[in-house]
Image (tube, helix red, strand yellow):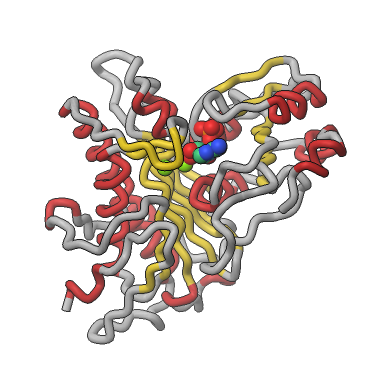
Amino acid sequence: MIAAARHLLGAASVCQIRRAAINMSSTPNVLMRLVATAYSVAEKSGVIVRNIMSGGDLGIVEKTGANDLQTAADRLVQQSICSSLAKKFPQITLIGEEDLPYEEVEDGLIELGQSEDVLKYPCPPQYTNIKEEELVVWVDPLDGTKEYTEGLLDHVTVLIGIAYEGKAIAGVINQPYYNYQAGNDAVLGRTIWGVLGVGAFGFELKEVPDGTHIITTTRSHSSKQVNDCIAAINPDKVIRVGGAGNKIIQLIEGQASAYVFASPGCKKWDTCAPEAILHAVGGKLTDIHGNPFEYQKDVKHMNSAGVLAALRNFNYYASRVPDSVKQALVP
Ligand code: AMP
Ligand code: MG
Ligand code: MG
């Protein structure tokens, strides 16, 4: 029976898992149970990411080219997240980045626990009657893979985004190497989570001082257009780091004031969890035009019109994007 739930994982392909014997679709608060489970699954993902690195064999494969890589960590974490969530929530739609063949997943990759801390928070009233089959989960098993292969370990995150009616409403981000340069006593890794109407947790919210403009952007997918757009904003400082998850963490921790990426390349699994967490603390993430992203199961995966995000003063950054950049980036 459980094997029936295993035809997930397909990347770029949508996987709906239905298991008739257990039907929890009408259970209240499916959202908070899903977030609590995603939290535990993301923690396990962090362990897998670290174990692959310490094992020394990353198993690197080029997908579309040298700047689009997949490692054993991307593969195993995707299997772990998708098979774990599918077992407990057989009717959700799971969309993961990696295009993996249908296969049995080892028991050791399955995580069925749930965070009791998350479950202490009541579900916001607007989400209490959500049915399991109405939720779409966007999974980036390893965001910042290029940086992972280059040893820039704190750029790496695991992203589990939850969407309802096309909107990113909850997200979990694990940062496996948080604190890795902080000395032996520091706890390695952390998990940040958020739900619209509840808030976001697992970090200390900080803001860049008003009037200071620090842009965070790509380090490995840059272009003239990406740089022209940043130059038009005339920032005080530009930080170039890997990962969409990492850049949103910089926004909510006061290291950067805007995330600007005037290029296609990011996908829905890159933005869903970060967007939900940023929005849960009052920030905004959209395409470069200021249009919201849609996360229904049948949407185009590519965010063709770039990414623009800020914790505060979003409209200022949106107003500085040149028309030439907007014309070049069609949604
Ligand atoms: P970056 O800021 O370059 O680390 O990109 C954030 C996310 O978008 C990562 O998951 C990248 O893999 C993805 N991404 C951005 N641009 C591209 C691209 N040109 N090709 C493949 N993936 C990209
Ligand atoms: Mg990614
Ligand atoms: Mg990835």
**185 or 153: nearer the viewer:** 153
| Viewer-closest of 104 and 313 | 104
Kindly tell me whether residue 247 is visible in this rendering: yes
Residue 49 to residue 183: above or below: below
Total numbered badges shown on the rendered structure:
0
- In the picture provided, is 229 more to the left or to the right than 176? right
Q: Based on the displayed image, in which of its 4 quarters is residue 14 positioned?
A: bottom left
| Left or right: 205 in relation to 139 | right
Residue 146 coordinates in the image, percent (x, y): 41, 29
Name the residue located 25 percent from the left edge and 47 percent from the top edge.
Answer: 76
On-image quarter of the N terminus: bottom left
Residue at 19%, 33% (x, y): give it.
Answer: 51
User: Where, by quadrant of the figure, is residue 156 drawn?
Assistant: top left
Residue at 24 percent of width and 15 percent of height? 184
Spot occupied by residue 199 in the image (x, y as percentages of width and height): 55, 50
Residue at the image point whose x is 34% and y is 26% from the top: 149
In the picture as drawn, the residue positioned furthest to the left comes out as 107
Question: Is residue 244 visible to us here?
Answer: no
Q: Position of residue 239 (x, y in %)?
A: 60, 20
Q: On the image, which quarter does residue 154 sit in?
A: top left
- In the picture as drawn, the residue positioned furthest to the bottom comes out as 20
Please determine whether, in this image, residue 68 is positioned above or below residue 295: above
Q: Is residue 178 above or below residue 114?
A: above
| Residue 150 x, y percent position in the rendering | 37, 21
For ligand 3, the image quadrant comes to top left
Give the side of residue 4 with respect to residue 254, left or right: left
